[in-house]
Amino acid sequence: YPVPAAERLTIPVVLDHASLSRLELYGSAGQLVRAVDLGILPAGRTERSIDVLELQNGVYQYVVRSSDSVQQGRITVMH
C-alpha cells in the first residue's frame, strides 16, 4: 500500500521463521526491474517500504522470497 503507489510502497511480509529475504519487482512483460535485499526478517508479520520514484507508471508484480516461502502480489505505480 498505498494503491496506487506514488513515492513509496509498503509491502507486508508474513514468515513462519526468521529468514533472509529478498524483494523482486517485475514489469508487465515479466522482466526483473528491481531487486532489494531485505535482510533477515523476523517471524510473524512485518512490513518493508521501498522507494518507487524511479519506476515508470504501470502495474508490477512483486515477489518476496525467503528460505521457506514465496509471497507475491501486484502493485500499481502512478506519479
Image (spheres, rainbow, N blue to C red):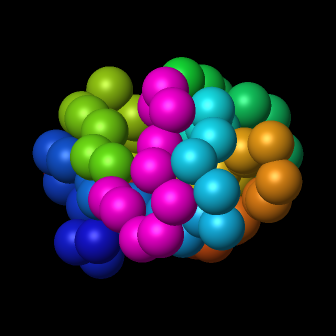
Per the picture, the main secondary structure of the magenta-coloured stretch is strand
Residue found at x 40% / y 35%: 55
State the quadrant of the N terminus: bottom left
Q: Is residue 30 left or right of residue 61?
A: right
Q: Position of residue 3 (x, y in %)?
A: 30, 76
Give how far across and how far down residue 75 sits, in percent.
48, 66
**Does residue 24 show up?**
yes
Q: Is residue 42 above or below residue 40?
A: below
Which picture quadrant has residue 62?
Answer: bottom right
> Residue placed at 45% from the left, 50% from the top?
42
* In-image side of 42 versus 77 (left or right): right
Report whether 73 appears left or right of 51. Answer: right
**Which residues, given as a range, are shown in magenta?**
38-47
Residue 5 vertical placement versus 50 (above, below): below
Q: Position of residue 21 (x, y in %)?
A: 61, 37
Residue in front for this viewpoint, 2 or 38:
38
Queried whether the magenta region covers residue 69, the answer comes back as no
Q: Nearer the viewer, residue 10 or 59?
A: 10
Query: Could you say which quadrant of the image residue 31 lies in?
Result: top right
Image point 72% across, 44% down: which residue?
66
Q: How many marks?
A: 0
Q: Is residue 36 visible?
A: no
Q: List x then y, in percent, for residue 79.
A: 19, 51
| Residue 35 located left or right of residue 29 | left
